[in-house]
Image (spheres, coloured by chain):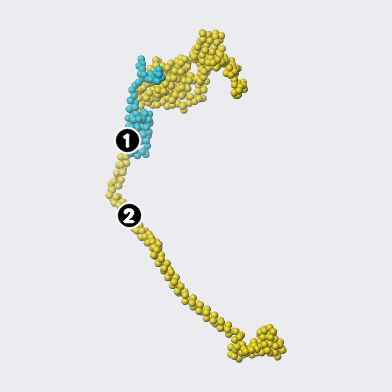
Chain colours: A cyan, B yellow
């Protein structure tokens, strides 16, 4: 269980969502054993939580990308006038 | 070309001087490339002494140096400048001192919109052949981009529109803007550079956006270089150039075409609420299906509890124990018999293999043979004695037949005198012939007086002759 949780934390939003959809499909299969379905269900609950976290984890940022004199790229916050 | 190829030498002894080679090149080029029209975009424009015009003529993949001398510039009815698309008429010449070839332009025409449209159509055909518009080459746009890139003018209303839409859809977005001139001579190059920069910096999706404008204003988005850059870009590109009615090559090569910059922004990221609804839906499905599963499991348990094993477990268990014991007993008995049989066979075999037993068997056999022999022996002896008696009898018989014995008993033997031949019949002698008569004590030389042809009568005197 520990491992599974760690794995989920590292997933991108798309990966987590895809996995979640896969789990629901598996659960909808009549043939899955109850014991297996319980662990799948637990994983699904964690994945959906992870997806929701991903939606909120970023902060709003608007930056402009420019190249400095030494040739490296930097992104600077820009304030836009309405 | 043939001229050039036929006159090439491959012998070091006959090496050409650089001047000679250059003269030949000049000759070849000016002979073959004279009085032609060529189309391209002007760059590196330079006017020498306000008289001769020097510039490069370009397309996406090639460039050629061009010069227009003062004598020809006087006929121009427009000003040549960078970024202009021109049709030039002239010939190729070689400038020997610098080893360069260039187009000596005599006439220049601005390419009209009609011609631009035609050129655009040709470019579209060419790119189509290269697969630039192939739906199979379109990359999918990620659902939740961590960083959204935008290639547009920072000052314009386009960026404002994009941000407004992003704000509505997903409050905590991260936008990286790469400022470019969206029209003018340098625009196409700037767009290409911006795409490179965003790719290098790393974003998840790129919006290329520009507001409406004239056909010429949008020209940068119809260039082959921008098309190629967008096509080669590894990050999904959403293009929104001009109004909905404008359709640039950039729009068509991009992975997604958006009618306006606002739409592009909307396509770059899903509405956060939609995400939340989607996840909730999935959760709902998951809970429902799991709940059903658990309920079904309970129903199955209820059903099982109704079965006899749970209601009258003792009787079933007892019956099973009985069955088991019977089976067990049967197997025990069966296996005992089998075991006994096998054991006796085994013991017998072991006995057969025992050395003492074998020796005693041999001795027994030997005794048996001896007994047989003993029984046989008297039979053999008996037979021998019989044979011996019989032989003696035969020998006696034989003795009694010996003529010498007969003579000794008083019989006579007659022979002739010459051949000493026994005379057994009267036919063997003649009357008056001399014969010998042998008796037991001597012989009588005798003469035959008469042959009496009559058998003597031995009857009644047999005993005398025995």
Q: Nearer the viewer, residue B371 or B441?
A: B441
Query: Relative to residue B178, is residue B389 depicted above or below?
Result: below
Q: Is residue B41 positioned above or below B338 on the image?
A: above
On the image, the x and y values in percent for residue B30 come to: 59, 16
Q: Quadrant of the C terminus of chain B?
A: bottom right
Q: Nearer the viewer, residue B229 or B376?
A: B376
Looking at the picture, does residue B384 appear above or below residue A46?
A: below
Q: Which mark is residue B328?
A: 2
B349 relative position to B37: left or right: left
Is residue B87 something one can see in this rendering? no
Q: Quadrant of the N terminus of chain B?
A: top right
Q: Chain of mark 2?
A: B
Q: Identify the residue shown where x is 45% and y is 20%.
A: B192
Give how far across and how far down residue B409 sits, in percent.
Answer: 60, 89
Place residue A5 in its image quadrant.
top left
Residue at 54% x, 12% y: name it.
Answer: B68
Query: Mark 1 falls on what kind of element?
Result: loop
The number of numbered discs placed on residues in the rendered structure image is 2
Q: CA distance from mark 1 to mark 2?
A: 47 Å
Q: Quadrant of residue B295?
A: top left
SS of the residue under disc 2 = helix
Point out the residue furthest to the front here.
B13
**Residue at left offset 46%, top offset 24%:** B232
Residue B258, image x and y in percent?
43, 21
Question: Of discs 1 and 2, which sits in the foreground?
Answer: 1
Looking at the image, residue B180 sits to the left or right of residue B31; the answer is: left
- Tag 1, which chain? A
Mark 1 residue crowding within 10 angstroms, few (<14) / some (14–19) / many (20+) = few
Residue indicated by mark 1: A1
């Amino acid at each position: 269980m520990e491992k599974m949780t760690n794995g989920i934390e590292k997933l991108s939003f798309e990966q987590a969502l895809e996995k979640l959809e896969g789990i629901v499909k598996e659960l909808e299969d009549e043939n899955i054993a109850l014991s297996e379905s319980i662990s799948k269900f637990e994983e699904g609950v964690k994945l959906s939580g992870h997806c929701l976290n991903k939606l909120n984890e970023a902060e709003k940022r608007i930056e402009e990308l420019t190249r400095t004199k030494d040739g490296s790229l930097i992104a600077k916050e820009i304030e836009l006038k309405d | 070309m043939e001229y050039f190829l036929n006159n090439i030498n491959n012998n070091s002894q006959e090496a050409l001087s650089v001047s000679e080679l250059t003269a030949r090149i000049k000759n070849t080029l000016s002979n073959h490339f004279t009085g032609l029209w060529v189309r391209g975009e002007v760059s590196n424009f330079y006017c020498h002494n306000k008289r001769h015009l020097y510039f490069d003529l370009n397309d996406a993949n090639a460039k050629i140096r061009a010069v227009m001398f003062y004598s020809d510039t006087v006929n121009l009815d427009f000003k040549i400048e960078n970024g202009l698309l021109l049709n030039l008429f002239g010939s190729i010449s070689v400038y020997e001192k610098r080893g360069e070839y260039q187009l000596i332009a005599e006439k220049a025409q601005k390419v009209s919109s009609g011609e631009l449209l035609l050129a655009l159509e040709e470019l579209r055909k060419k790119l189509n052949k290269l697969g630039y518009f192939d739906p199979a080459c379109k990359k999918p746009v990620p659902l939740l981009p961590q960083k959204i890139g935008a290639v547009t003018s920072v000052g314009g209303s386009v960026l404002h529109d994009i941000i407004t839409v992003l704000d509505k859809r997903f409050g905590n977005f991260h936008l990286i803007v790469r400022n470019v001139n969206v029209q003018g001579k340098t625009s196409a190059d700037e767009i290409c550079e911006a795409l490179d920069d965003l790719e290098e910096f790393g974003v998840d999706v790129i919006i290329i956006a520009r507001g409406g404008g004239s056909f010429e204003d949008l020209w940068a988005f119809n260039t082959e270089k921008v098309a190629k850059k967008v096509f080669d870009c590894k990050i999904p590109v959403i293009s929104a150039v001009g109004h909905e009615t404008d359709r640039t090559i950039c729009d068509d090569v991009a992975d997604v075409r958006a009618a306006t910059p606002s739409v592009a922004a909307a396509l770059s990221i899903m509405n956060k609420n939609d995400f939340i609804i989607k996840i909730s839906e999935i959760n709902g499905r998951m809970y429902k299906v799991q709940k059903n599963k658990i309920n079904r499991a309970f129903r199955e348990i209820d059903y099982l509890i109704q079965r006899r094993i749970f209601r009258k477990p003792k009787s079933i268990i007892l019956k099973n124990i009985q069955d088991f014991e019977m089976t067990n007993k049967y197997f025990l008995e069966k296996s005992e018999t089998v075991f006994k049989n096998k054991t006796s066979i085994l013991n017998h075999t072991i006995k057969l293999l025992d050395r003492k037993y074998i020796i005693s068997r041999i001795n027994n056999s030997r005794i048996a043979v001896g007994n047989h022999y003993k029984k046989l022996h008297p039979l053999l002896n008996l037979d021998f004695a019989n044979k011996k008696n019989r032989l003696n009898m035969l020998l006696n018989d034989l003795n009694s037949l010996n003529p010498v014995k007969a003579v000794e008993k008083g019989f006579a033997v007659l022979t002739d005198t010459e051949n000493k031949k026994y005379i057994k019949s009267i036919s063997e002698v003649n009357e008056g012939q001399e014969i010998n008569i042998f008796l037991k004590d001597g012989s009588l030389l005798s003469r035959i007086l008469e042959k009496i042809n009559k058998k003597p009568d031995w009857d009644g005197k047999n005993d005398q002759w025995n």
